[in-house]
Image (cartoon, helix red, strand yellow):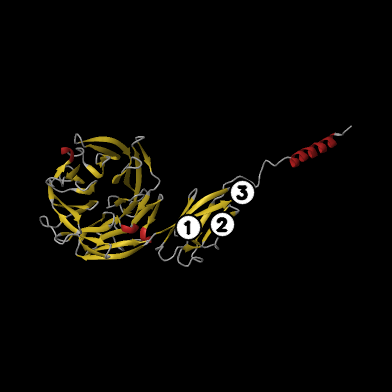
Amino acid sequence: MIRPIHKLFVLIWGVLFLLLSCPSPVKSLDEEDYVPEFNAFYLSPSINGSISDVVIGDIDEDSVVLVVPGSGSSNTWFCPSFDTDAATVMVGNQEQRSGESWLDFSDPVEYTLISAGGISSTVTVEIIFSGIWQYSYMLGGAQSPQLGIINGMYPYFVYESGLMGGYYYDSLNSYWDYLDTSYYTFGSGSYPYLGAAEYGNTVFVIAYESASMWLEPYSWSYGLWSSSWGSYGLSGSISDINVYTRDSYQPYISYINTADNSYPEMVFFNTGSDNNGRLMGYAPIEYRSATSLMASVSYSGIYAATTYQDDSDTIYLYRFDEGYEYWYSETTLAVSGALVEGLFYDQEDNSLELAVSVQNSDDPSKTDLTFYRFEFNSYSWEHQPYDLTLSVVQGSEIQIVQGEDSFLVATDQYCYELIQDYWVELGGGPYISTPALSFSVSYGENNRIYVGYETASDLYIYYLER
């Protein structure tokens, strides 16, 4: 007969035997099927003498982005420090050690992270150089710079200096040359606004003064510039003026007619006939007082986005019917207190990208720039994951330029570029120490970015050396 205490003893030993003889249901970290990753990735100035401050990488699921001040033309070799739960870190067939291994980051580098259990993951690490603003040209007494690029090769700028003129950059000879050897003046020759748009070898310059809008198209032919002009009469002052084109024949201008109840309007010039302007739709886009207006012009459609004084919580999107010459409402987007800052068509995705600004909720001296995408296939709006806070009050001039895979955003002191959904402050700081009176930004040749700005006495052109 087994006594109760002996029964308990046997039972305990039996349970222990089963637990010890069976595989453990709980694995250690080294044996688990986990995917290794970087917990931290950074560049230390104590190791990397070319930087003065710690550069911390922005870690996503399978990528790390580091923004390094200065230009990559002088140095692309760095020794990163990192923290990871991987047992082994490899680049190619070379094991990497934190704070010890040097690599060339002139191109993105693929790291392979391997756990103790043999599970691996690939993380792409990219270093983006914020660049250095380099002096390019200065023009005394000039105002209202507008920049662009001709034929994808020649940066240009137009300006107002009592007379309207312009220069383009001769890349072969490395100097700025006259856009036209003879200047044209309209009326007094002093313009509250000067704008430009280009297509191929044609540059459309739009000048506005008092109650008139003037067109000056330049055409490049055999190394010479030729031009002719047209005009469009207005009832008075206008604001929010922007110039667009989709070919070398017709420029389009959107504006708010402040002399006529602040109605939103668009005009086009037909350079194939008399060059003179004509109101699109023969009427305002809508008979309501607008607070902001931007348009998108392409062969996929002409669209306009507006906000109104009587409805500060809604953005209205319109489409122009070119057959019937009529504006009709496409859709709306609810964004409280927003102003439209940009509208761009993406042919590849069949979508519109809309940029709007709202006052920063924590600091009224700052503005939040937000992007939305309207998908025509699903007929819906989607908020994009790249908001940007700008150090200007809402309503200040903001210029947005669309690149092939990115956007440029400029204010009166700073310029930013969107790279892989990550905003980079170009030049690592302001392109001018005090706010510019007027400014313009554009992509240029060889992946350069140009900025032109006006001071109290002169006009300056700088480019970004990456």
For this view, does 335 lie left or right of residue 17? Answer: left
Q: Which residue is mark 2?
A: 93
Q: Which residue is mark 3?
A: 118
x and y percent of residue 239 in the render? 20, 48
Residues at marks 3 and 2, CA–CA distance in whole angstroms:
16 Å
Asked if one can make out residue 389 in the rendered structure from this viewpoint, the answer is yes
- Which amino acid type corresponds to the residue marked 1 in the rendered image? Ile
x and y percent of residue 304 in the render? 25, 41
For this view, does 26 lie left or right of residue 386? Answer: right
Q: Residues within 10 Å of mark 1 (few under 14, many from 20)?
A: some
Asked if one can make out residue 211 in the rendered structure from this viewpoint, the answer is no
Q: Which residue corresponds to the image point at 36% horizontal and 58% vertical from the top-left?
A: 426
Q: Which residue is mark 1?
A: 56
**Occupied quadrant, residue 379:** top left
Residues at marks 1 and 2, CA–CA distance in whole angstroms:
26 Å
- SS label for mark 3: loop
Viewer-nearest residue: 66 or 314: 66
Viewer-nearest residue: 80 or 58: 80
